[in-house]
Amino acid sequence: MPDSENTTSPAPFSFDDSPIARELADLTSRRKVLAEVKVEFDGSTRVFTVSNQKGGVGKTTTTVNLAAGLASVGARVLVIDLDPQGNSSTALGIPHSADVASIYDVLIDEEPLADVIQTSPESPNLLCAPSTIHLAGAEIELVSQVAREHRLRTALETYLAENHVDFVFIDCPPSLGLLTINAFTAATEVLIPIQCEYYALEGLSQLLGSVSMIQKHLNPALHLSTILLTMYDGRTRLAQQVADEVRTHFPDRVLTTVIPRSVRVSEAPSFGQTVIAYDGQSAGAVAYREAAVEIARRGLAQNSEEGAH
Ligand SMILES: Nc1ncnc2c1ncn2[C@@H]1O[C@H](COP(=O)(O)OP(=O)(O)OP(=O)(O)O)[C@@H](O)[C@H]1O
Ligand SMILES: [Mg+2]
């Protein structure tokens, strides 16, 4: 008898059992669910500030893709670009050269917010108050202004009295200066993107300390409502550890959806697009669309709970 017949031969390779095939099957079924998803909006406006004083953790990416994800399920969404880098404006395809009317004019010259808002070419439901390079000076110019912490809030309240949007997302710079304080004063919900990497939690207690200071002195309604884990690489043990640690600390704030690290997500801004428009069926876009639906549904659940009390 030849040797080969004596040994137990390994199971024949089947593509269906491979991890990649399982991932694709999973993605396909998630796309199907999203294609049929229905979200209702109750006519209220939720104002989020997307903050984390750490740089490069995914604040802008999260702002524009959640906004586009919500717009794609029928919400009317306003993005306020409060970062002098202007990355949200770029990603939404909004011109923001120095001569464009911008959020700087609103904060410093009290121009109406309605006069600087533009519509993203991606969707008539997706609006943006752009930032220009002038905003870089605003941090210092604001110091000598009257009601310097409330200027964005006042402008937003005036706008919302005449215009309805379901969601406002304010993209903050990576610092805790007067621009970020204006965002904290204008918002009711803080959304913190956390990058699943080493040092992810460092600085978080400082951020939460700032949130409670603002709560105490400027805006009692402000609260941390949402944490989104971003740039998750499931192949590394570190990413899993960070995710577990964040979930242990903030069990009811962390979204179930996790945003994977994805080349499509990082490519989209160079085309002046969100990943939802650039490649809406890619893994990163699917995750952001799911996160958007989760945020919308959590809000409805919270509002009906509050209504019941
Ligand atoms: N899920 C992802 N997969 C791959 N790359 C990502 C992902 N999310 C963000 N990035 C990339 O990481 C970098 C930082 O992201 P982003 O600009 O959103 O962070 P940020 O917190 O807004 O930064 P800053 O503090 O400078 O404002 C960008 O180059 C972005 O394209
Ligand atoms: Mg940014």
Image (spheres, helix red, strand yellow):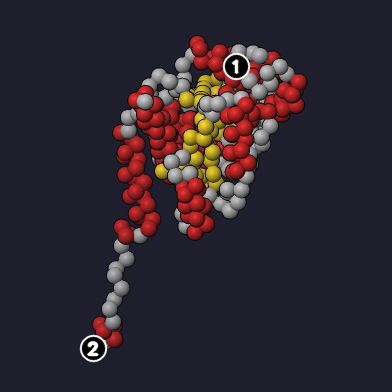
Q: How many marks overall?
A: 2
- Towards the viewer: 62 or 72: 62
Q: Can you say which quadrant of the picture contains the C terminus?
A: top left
Quadrant of residue 301 in the image? top left
| Residue occupying the point 46% across, 22% down | 45
What kind of element bears circle 1? helix
Query: Outermost residue, bottom direction?
Result: 1
- Residue 181 image position (x, y, % from top left): 64, 28
Labelled disc at residue 1: 2
Query: Outermost residue, left direction?
Result: 1
Q: What's the residue type where badge 1 is placed? A: Thr
**Lateral position of residue 247 relative to residue 108, left or right:** left
**Label 2: few (<14), some (14–19) or many (≥20) C-alpha neighbours in 10 Å:** few
Which residue position is annotated with label 1?
154
- Towards the viewer: 252 or 172: 252
Labelled disc at residue 256: none
| Residue occupying the point 50% across, 55% down | 241
Q: Can you say which quadrant of the picture contains the N terminus?
A: bottom left
Distance Cα–Cα, label 1 vs label 2: 88 Å
